[in-house]
Image (cartoon, helix red, strand yellow):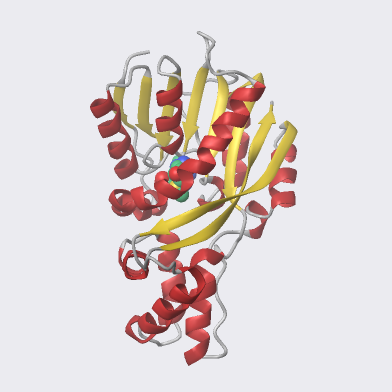
Amino acid sequence: MANTITSVVASDELSKSWSPFSAEYNAVERMTIPLVQEVVYEVNQLSPLDAPDDIAFDNGCGTGAVTIILKTAFPNLKLISTDISEGMIEQVLTKVKERGWKNVEARVLDAADLKGIADSSITHTFSTFMLCLASEPHQILNEMYRVTKPGGILGFATWADPYFGFWTTPWTKACRELDPEYGPPYVMEPAWTLLDSVGMRLQEAGFKEVNLHHATSMWQWNSVQEAVDWFLEAGHPRNVVISRSWTERGRDIEEIKLGFTRALAEAYEQDDGKMAGPCIACIGTARK
Ligand SMILES: C[S@@+](CC[C@H](N)C(=O)[O-])C[C@H]1O[C@@H](n2cnc3c(N)ncnc32)[C@H](O)[C@@H]1O
């Protein structure tokens, strides 16, 4: 398989919401990469990724967390990397070019309709931190099952907390100082984040030997201020939901900045002025 540059744009609100954010996604990727490394390790333990006819799939690849780890460890592995967002795929294609990776097909594709990927064609399907943020998770899971080879492995990760407490806990503390009635919104559905529920959904889609567990990555920032600025300005689609839950009450973001900065510092600031806090995921494997 040669490197291909294709753009089959599934243009909807979702792809539009992630695309402007793609240049800022590297800040997230530095926190997802250790979790993704663990997923790749667990998959490789079950079914080594070095057979000549292996084909891996990074579904909802973002800026390429799985892709980077796979191509670094297994340079000859055939890999299809797809995402609904054109901006994310542009970032992956830049990495493919800069790092000289071969056998990577990166293209825009909606995971709810994996056009061009044949039934039972993938030996190792990966999907990390996409399903819990996507609009049609049932259909996406069915599509992942369809394209995976019988006996093939799924390497999987979702966030484990529907509120994504890393941001929401300090944010809520700050909001309640000004408005005790404030309640935070879910930023992801409990059904696609809570461990038992996610495991059940994988089984309902047909996957067997589902083995999910919690894992934590510490999200590091150079300073609390850097984190506050990124949260408010980078445009992560789910952080926008959190901010909007305040402005929809007729309040101003400026009012909350100081309290949010203080609450983040209380929770996560370190002696050297840097900041680090835990993000909890459900990660693991399953087999078709
Ligand atoms: C949080 S990022 C995860 C990226 C990467 N897998 C990682 O682990 O860092 C979620 C990605 O899912 C993509 N996404 C959301 N819905 C999608 C869909 N229906 N089909 C394909 N990609 C989708 C977004 O564009 C975004 O790049």
Identify which residue, 202 or 96, lies in the foreground.
96
Determine if residue 245 is in view: yes
Task: State whether residue 192 is above or below residue 49.
Answer: below
Q: Residue at x 38, y 65 (%)?
A: 272
Question: Which residue occupies the foreground of this view, 37 or 184?
Answer: 37
In screen coordinates, is 105 left or right of 187?
left
Give the quadrant of residue 7.
top left
Q: Residue furthest front?
A: 271
The image position of residue 172, as x and y in percent, is: 52, 78
Q: Measured from the top left, where is residue 169 in percent x and y? A: 54, 72
Q: Quadrant of the C terminus?
A: top right
Quadrant in which residue 45 is drawn: top right
The residue nearer to you, when weighing 17 against 75, is 75
Q: Residue at x 69, y 45 (%)?
A: 213
Residue at the extreme top of the image, as rendered: 52
- Asked if residue 143 can be seen in this view, the reply is no
Q: Residue at x 59, y 38 (%)?
A: 156
Residue 145 is situated, as x and y percent measured from the top left of the image, at 63, 30
| Above/below status of 273 relative to 259 | above
The number of numbered badges drawn on the structure is 0
- What's the residue at 31%, 61% (across, down)? 234
Q: Quadrant of ligand 1?
A: top left
Q: Is residue 192 above or below residue 97?
A: below
Q: The N terminus appears in which quarter of the rendering?
A: top left
| Image x and y of residue 29, in percent | 41, 46
Is residue 85 left or right of 218 when viewed as pictured? Answer: left
